[in-house]
Amino acid sequence: MAYIKPSQREEFEIAIICGLPLEFNAVSLLLDEYWDEDGDDFGRSPGDVNHYTTGRIGRYNVVLALLSHMGKVHTASAAASIRSSYGGIRLALLVGICGGAPRAVNGEDDEILLGDVIISKTVVQYDFGRLYPDKFVRKNTFEGNLGIPNKDIRNLLITFETDIGLERLQRRTAYFLKQLQANATGRKRQDRYSYPGTAEDKLFKAIYRHKHHIPCTCICRDCNSVSDPVCGEALDSSCEEIGCDSIYLEPREQLEAKRRLEQDRSDKAQEPTVHVGSIASGDIVMRSADERDRIAKKEGVIAFEMEGAGIWEELPCIVIKGISDYADCHKNKRWQNFAAATAASTLKAILERYIQTDKISKESMDPLGRELITQGASRYCCEVRGEDVTQGNELQISSSQSSRHCIVQEGSYFEGVIQAAGSVAQGNKISI
Ligand SMILES: [Zn+2]
Ligand SMILES: [Zn+2]
Ligand SMILES: [Zn+2]
């Protein structure tokens, strides 16, 4: 089947957002087609400083954005710009790498290994709250708990919590991982995305610190507890350089199972497990096993990352992240490319399951492709964002000042960009 290049920005329904060039590189190996091979034809809105790459994955036109700054504020503003330039986006996918909690606390007690992929059910802003002299209290409000995704996303995610849905997703993830590796080989980057191997998947016991274990004269000599300081040189060194000892590794059943596959020379050893759960998002780089375990237990999160909260506030979003480390002090970069590759593979597998919505007939759309809504003799075109908006709902216009209105309907809060063919006044109602 031949796919037609979109003629305008509004035809793009899927945004893919990456925080690091290495994440972007992995995703770009799985695009089926690029729409900007000969330069960008789509432009952007005034004030939008994002750079976009456009193309197609399966039957979806996708727009890729690479963030240039870390942190929630920058991420949120980049996401708002995507929304303003690409008004037809139904789903944003934040794809990349993150730190993992080694064990999910969902009752099943399943192990999470490096290279596994996490899909966000919710995002928790764990650094949002008050710091008291003796403790930090996370604000348990809407801002702190970023809320549940919209119904469309919830209905998609719930299928990955069924046995058949998860099994299919993992099977297709494994398939696309091989496709990515093959595409990388074609570009002479075959080694970059290969599975680092079970021997490199090291989870140290939470109490075992990353410090000089070899004889030395630095402050590491006096580091005996989980909170004693270690020297800066140790923090910048690898476990091998400073003598972190493998006898302090946690025994892991899933890793042993993979090791047996590896010994059989089965390429199944590299296949990631996909976990659906809550993700902790914050402006802090987590490098403490002690804190990791405490927050994982308290908040029920299985991963730690830094961009999800910013995107989540601006766009309907799913976070898809490959585990590249255990969010502890023994961090290294060995798994980053592979984890970016597994996350990109799950992204493609998810899009395959995402059901395309029929296009609304041209007569009921405005030139930008937004749906027109009729009220009395007036016709509005309105892009409604909000929870639980269904046919028959009425939206009351609360302001006639600008083209962007806040709308209240029976306790629910909507936000919409309204453009009127007729006249829109305060107090007008729109039936969806
Ligand atoms: Zn030393
Ligand atoms: Zn030291
Ligand atoms: Zn170490």
Image: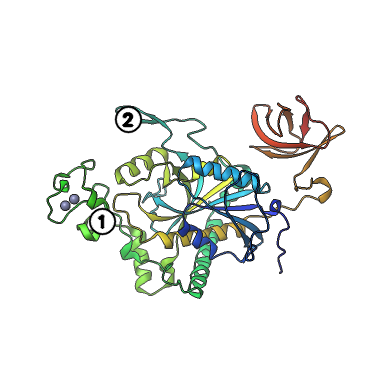
Left or right of 10: which side holds 278?
Answer: left
Residue found farthest to the right: 377
Where is residue 54 drawn, in percent x and y? Answer: 62, 59
- Expressed as whole percent of the image width and height from the top left, the position of residue 324 reads 39, 56
Callout 2 secondary element: loop
Q: Give residue 425's quadrant in the image.
A: top right
Which residue was labeled with disc 2? 135
Residue 402 is drawn in which quadrant?
top right
Q: Residue at x 72, y 54 (%)?
A: 8
The front one of 21 and 388 is 21
**Residue 36: % across, % down:** 63, 62
Q: Is residue 265 above or below residue 70?
A: below
Residue type, label 1: Ser
Quick one: 378 or 116, which is closer to the camera?
378
Say whether residue 415 is left or right of residue 373: left
**Residue position for label 1:** 237
